[in-house]
């Protein structure tokens, strides 16, 4: 070995990342010490062998990024994959690949660098756990406060009113309250009050006696009866008619109800959790919702913020749905690519978390493994100008619009300057100048 | 004896945990009697085991495999010969010639592979 080669080997062995190089026949030509440690294969065994026989990664069968890099002549960075070591351990790693060129610029092979992500993956899992509360996932401060008070609230048996837009997870919150309460061994019955016509809703809620109406051949228990000892979740309570509001009020006040066609009131031991996406106070003012019922159900009020006000949850929720769909559909999707995430972070999500779930489900149709790329997102995200970007867009002078765009981009990227520059397509210097010019400070959030 | 080879194109798949296709072969008196291809999903482990049992597979020959996956398969009475690489034809020839240990991936516990390949099944 000549002096230059000896130096190269020493330098490579001092690097903490695993590094190997291949020739154009995919045979390993260099294998550093970190590569030995991460793969569990000795250098003497690795040199001269096909890289797939040494590396044992999940992309070796048909999705090799080293091959892509050599074929396109461009480097590929930071892909998350896993390898299996000879001891049977599955090790998550992040890899980058680049073509190797000789002094004439001709490609003579490729280099792959990789890092053991086991610890980071474990930490990520721990972090995910700390942001999870039953089926709810959030790191938003408002949601975290909700998670904190939920256990005390659950044991209190008080009626709860959940306010929030459609798709924000009100039913999941109701289920968490039920699971934390002493009623958890009994049923939680969820009823969408807006989905049924008034007369049907009454018979569904309270049940009926045989002969109450034509075709009522025998007694039928209602949701109150099914939820006895448990919890009744009344979704879209704002859509209930005034006539039924009176009957609900009676159940809440007297803890009794009378089934349709019945003569004797039945006692109800049911906890009520009501939810609505409407402004109940406004409905009370408009005399569309009874004030006395409003005060009865508004014992404890919880507000679930819309997704556009807790965008920091988008990566967390997307990851949660990716893991769930992987299990359900038997796919191996790793994560959203930075580009796809950036597109979603700019979107306002009028359909909230349910819309994000649908977007991920759509992406699973086109993407079976690896990263979800922008082209895997629904059609409306392909033409980015169509997407609703922000609440302030298009108002004010050009200077104001520019300032608002910078502030919003900074917020979306958690005030990380490099990520903001990438999103806006400007240099770090330009961003710095704009921050100074428009006197943008973090307190302006 | 019924063998199942986890394959990708015309060679053994690098990782069993990630493979989608099995070639199930029936070998009698050291002759290949029957061969069929089956698609499967290693993420639906219960279904995969059911399929392997329905097909009466006795041995799986594959590339790298996680300890977890190997334990599940072996607990269901199916032997696993892991860390094998090469073309499907070479692997079948080596099986019939009793030289499968020559196709063990480099650096992958040759002693371990020998134990499985040589003594247990041939």
Image (cartoon, coloured by chain):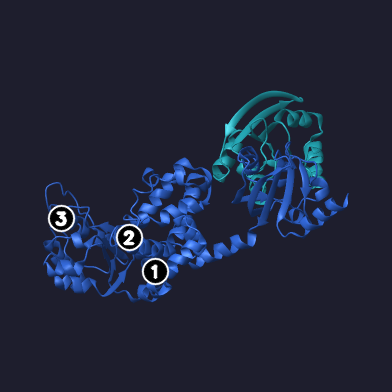
Chain colours: A blue, B cyan
* Chain identity of mark 3: A
Residue at the spot of label 1: A438
Q: Secondary structure at mark 2?
A: helix
User: Real-space Cα distance between discs 3 and 2?
Assistant: 52 Å
Left or right of residue A221: residue B53: right
Residue located at (32% from left, 74% from top): A157
Q: Could you tell me which residue is drawn at 32 percent across and 54 percent down?
A: A351
Say whether disc 1 or disc 2 marks the residue closer to the N-terminus: 2
**Quadrant in which the C terminus of chain A appears:** bottom left
Disc with the residue nearer the chain's start (1 vs 3): 3
Badge 2: residue crowd in 10 Å (few <14, some 14–19, many ≥20): few
The chain under label 2 reads: A
Query: Where residue A293 is drawn, which disc sits there?
Result: none
Instruction: Say which element carries label 3.
Output: helix
Question: With respect to residue A140, does B117 lie above or below?
Answer: above
Q: Report whether residue A306 is seen.
A: no
Return the x and y of residue A262 as percentages of the image width and height. Answer: 14, 60
Closer to viewer: mark 3 or mark 2: 2
Foreground residue among A26 and A391? A391
- 3 or 2: tag closer to the N-terminus: 3
Q: What is the chain letter for disc 1?
A: A
Quadrant for residue A53, please give it.
Answer: top right
Residue that carries the numbered disc 2 in the rendered image: A398
- Answer with the quarter of the image where residue A400 lies: bottom left
- Residue where numbered disc 3 is placed: A198
Nearer-the-camera pick, A286 or A134: A286
Residue appearing at x 29%, y 61% in the figure: A165
Residue occupying the point 18% across, 56% down: A203
């Amino acid at each position: 070995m000549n002096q230059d080669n000896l130096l190269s080997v020493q330098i490579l062995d001092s690097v903490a990342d695993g590094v190997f190089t291949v020739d154009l026949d995919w045979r390993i030509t260099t294998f550093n010490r970190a590569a030995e440690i991460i793969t569990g294969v000795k250098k003497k065994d690795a040199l001269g062998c096909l890289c797939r026989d040494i590396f044992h990664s999940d992309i070796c069968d048909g999705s090799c990024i080293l091959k892509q890099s050599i074929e396109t002549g461009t480097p590929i960075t930071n892909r998350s994959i896993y390898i299996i070591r000879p001891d049977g351990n599955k090790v998550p790693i992040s890899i980058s690949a680049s073509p190797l060129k000789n002094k004439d610029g001709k490609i003579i092979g490729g280099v792959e660098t990789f890092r053991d992500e086991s610890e980071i993956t474990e930490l990520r899992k721990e972090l995910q756990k700390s942001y999870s509360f039953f089926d709810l996932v959030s790191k938003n401060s408002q949601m975290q406060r909700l998670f904190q008070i939920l256990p005390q609230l659950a044991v209190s048996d008080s009626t709860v009113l959940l306010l929030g837009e459609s798709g924000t997870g009100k039913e999941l919150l109701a289920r968490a309250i039920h699971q934390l309460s002493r009623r958890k061994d009994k049923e939680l019955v969820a009823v969408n009050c807006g989905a049924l016509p008034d007369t049907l809703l009454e018979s569904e809620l309270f049940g009926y006696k045989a002969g109450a109406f034509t075709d009522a051949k025998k007694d039928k228990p209602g949701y109150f009866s099914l939820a006895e000892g448990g919890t009744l979740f009344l979704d879209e309570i704002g859509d209930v008619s005034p006539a039924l509001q009176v009957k609900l009020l009676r159940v809440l006040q007297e803890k009794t109800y009378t089934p349709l066609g019945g003569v004797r009131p039945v006692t109800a031991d049911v906890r009520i959790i009501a939810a609505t996406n409407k402004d109940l106070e406004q409905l009370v003012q408009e005399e569309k919702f009874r004030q006395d019922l409003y005060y009865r159900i508004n014992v404890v009020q919880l507000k679930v913020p819309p997704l556009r006000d807790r965008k920091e949850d988008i990566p967390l929720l997307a990851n949660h749905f990716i893991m769930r769909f992987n299990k359900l559909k038997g796919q191996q999707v790793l994560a959203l690519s930075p580009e796809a995430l950036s597109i979603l972070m700019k979107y306002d999500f009028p359909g909230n978390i349910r819309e994000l779930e649908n977007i991920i489900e759509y992406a699973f149709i086109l993407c079976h493994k690896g990263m979800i790329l922008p082209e895997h997102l629904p059609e409306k995200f392909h033409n980015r100008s169509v997407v609703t970007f922000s609440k302030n867009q298009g108002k004010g002078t050009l200077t104001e619009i520019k300032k608002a765009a910078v502030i919003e981009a900074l917020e979306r990227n958690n005030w990380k300057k490099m990520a903001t520059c990438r999103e806006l397509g400007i240099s770090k210097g330009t961003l710095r100048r704009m921050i100074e010019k428009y006197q943008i400070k973090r307190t302006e959030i | 004896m019924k063998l199942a080879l986890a394959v990708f194109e015309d060679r053994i798949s690098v990782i069993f945990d990630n493979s989608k296709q099995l070639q199930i072969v029936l070998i009698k008196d050291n002759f290949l009697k029957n061969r069929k291809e089956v698609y499967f999903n290693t993420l639906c482990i219960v279904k995969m085991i059911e399929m392997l049992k329905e097909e009466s597979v006795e041995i799986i020959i594959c590339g790298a495999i996680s300890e977890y996956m190997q334990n599940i398969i072996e607990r269901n009475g199916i032997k696993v010969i892991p860390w094998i690489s090469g073309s499907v034809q070479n692997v079948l020839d080596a099986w019939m010639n009793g030289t499968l240990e020559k196709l063990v991936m480099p650096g992958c516990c040759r002693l371990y592979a020998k134990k499985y390949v040589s003594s247990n099944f041939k």
